[in-house]
Amino acid sequence: MTNTGFHAIESRAFYALLLLGGLVTAAGLGAAHYMEVHGHVVTGMSNQVVWGLPHVFAIFMIVAASGVLNVASIGSVFGQTAYKPRAPLSGLLSLALLAGGLMVLMLDLGRPDRVIVAATHYNFTSVFAWNVFLYSGMAAIIAIYLWTMFERRLNGYSKAAGIAALVWRFALTTGTGSIFGFLVARQAYQSALLAPLFIVLSFAWGLAVFLIVQSVMYAWNGHNLPEDVRRRMARLLGVFVAASLYLVAVYHGTNLYFARQSAFEAFILLGRGDELGVFPALFWGGYVVVGALLPMLLLFMPRGAGPNGMLAASALVVAGAFALLFVFIVGGQSFPLEIFPGHEVTSSFADGAVELYRPRWPEWLLGIGGLGAAFVLTAIGIRALDFLPQDDFAAPGGKVAE
Amino acid sequence: MKTGAEQGLAGRRKFLGLAAAGMGGVLLAPGIHLIEVAQAATPAVTGKVRWGLLIDTTKCASGCSDCVSACNTENGLDPRPSPTSAQWIRKVEIKEIKTGRSASVPVMCQHCAEPPCVDVCPTGASFKRADGIVLVDRHSCIGCRYCVMACPYKARSFVHEPVSDQKADVPRGKGCVEGCTLCVHRVDKGGTPACVEACAKAGHHAMLFGDLNDPASEISQRIKAVASRQLRADLRLDPGVRYQGL
């Protein structure tokens, strides 16, 4: 379709997309209601795998929400001019992803009606309780940050707000990683490495989401991203993906060295004890190949990634993120707790047994509903306020559209 | 001299004051009464006592599940558990891989002195009483399942379905997490947990309940005399449940 042809139906196309996003969100809310009425028995979760697919979606969105703000930080904190016009979009996406992730997390609670209890009763030794403050504080800081960017009189405070957001973001993702890092009971977690790992993963996932949204927005408006900006952002994504892969390798490498962890690593990496081999397939195929090696190949090609290559690499990074989180969250619970090391164990409560968790439709709908909510918030934000990075079209060296 | 209007105003003020005092009394009185009822029902819990269990696995019979049945009956749990049902106590059959030595071990909440479930609970619903019993406040549990993730003993269950036929002393609810209460409702009346009673009734006497802080108690005497261990002692959570013969 030509640009003029698209221009004629642009408004209708926008509302059709918005409606679709609304329907997806509504389906997620419906699924949450169904789960609330019948209980979690309608999900694939059990007393062994208590955090299932909704947590995979929620943690992806929360981690990506932190990382997507990196674009703004590079602009206003580190003074990279190419990133500055992208800061508002980065802030909006961060808010939208945070809202989508928290929606899924809250609606997956056993008692979502008691969310007010979570907001009024705090146990300060709980990482979850810290996160309640970290998430709400994050939303407030981003709102202020956006305000300083949009309101000309406050532009001077933008850098200060950006630094606050940067620091808060590190704390937030440290908090998300520490949800698992502080769990002493399970083989998969209890590692201080999880906090920095989550921070680096957030950089990669957030930038991938940003590049996807930015590509779609530019294509929608018939603009081309200036080539030098695009190349820089593609290279940066490649660096983040490589750094994530390195930290994931170190995490498993240290575990392989400890004899007490070898059964767990054999389970995750080789599928020992897992008759379907879901976790090794998702780890090696989903994360390592699809989520890391292929994107790096596309992004670091000698001639440089083209616009489609960069978009494909970003989509692969997001797909790999889901694979890694599924292995990390569900795999970590599927592997039985070692209450009696050195013993074969059986019981009526699945002691010693690998749990084969299969997510059911309410969990899929709730998770995808969260993505829908993030999409709707982003779409409305972009329409109502001016989030499209503008000054590229006048920037020297940038290709002017049309 | 006050005008008629002023007098009327003063009268209305007086009336409103009296009415407010009366309303306050009406609203507060039942509350005060309830506090009395609540205090009467719960004897003072002190840290002088630490309730615990000693389980002698050499006396625990492999085919016997009387402790499990007694727990299910006492607490209104599902008598035929599915993977999503709550199981507050279960029989774990273990066999040492190197030696082939086997044993049957009842496992329930270990009532740790340093309970990870209490540390991670965001609302404070998971708590430890002064006497060492670890419980879940069903009014403030939001069902986040973080405690289930944190417990090294798989002692917590999430209520996956609506529950019916509840016992008056043991409130339960869909969407909350729960676990062994050490039959706190019986202990507070001077009794022993249902599992311990059932084990004795079956003639096994594999479970001993008592005060770990009292050097004269039977449990303290026994753990002084015989070798016993705590599960996952490496984690240093200091569980109140000890095992003999493992």
Image (tube, coloured by chain):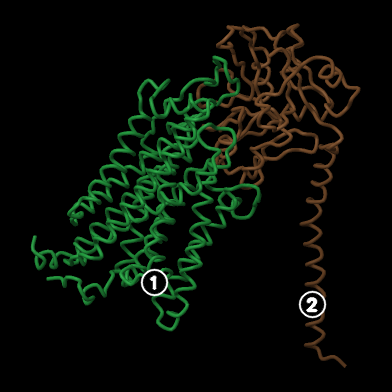
Chain colours: A green, B brown
Could you tell whether A63 is left or right of A125 in the image? left
Q: State the image quarter where residue A253 is shown.
A: top left
Look at mark 2 in the image and give the residue it sits on. Answer: B13
Look at mark 1 in the image and give the residue it sits on. Answer: A79
Task: Tell which residue pokes out farthest to the right in this image.
Answer: B216
Identify the chain of the residue marked 1, using the numbered disc in the image.
Answer: A
Rendered location of residue A216, percent (x, y): 23, 59
Q: A36 or A176, which lies in front?
A: A176
Query: Is residue A76 positioned above or below B179 on the image?
Result: below
Q: Residues within 10 Å of mark 2 (few under 14, many from 20)?
A: few
Rendered location of residue A5, percent (x, y): 9, 65
Residue in the picture at 76% in, 30% down: B185
Task: Tell which residue pokes out farthest to the bottom in this image.
Answer: B1
Residue in the picture at 81% in, 71% down: B17
Measure how far apart labels 1 and 2 are at the Cα level: 66 Å
Query: Is residue B109 positioned above or below A323 on the image?
Result: above
Residue A11 seen in the current view: no
Could you tell whether B88 is left or right of A44 in the image? right
Could you tell whether B114 is left or right of A359 in the image? right
Q: A157 or A78, which lies in front?
A: A78
Q: State the image quarter where residue B87 is shown.
A: top right
Q: B137 or A134, which lies in front?
A: A134
Query: Is residue B120 positioned above or below A356 on the image?
Result: below
Image quadrant holding the C terminus of chain A, namely: bottom left
Residue in the picture at 65% in, 8% down: B64
Q: Secondary structure at mark 1?
A: loop
Q: Secondary structure at mark 2?
A: helix
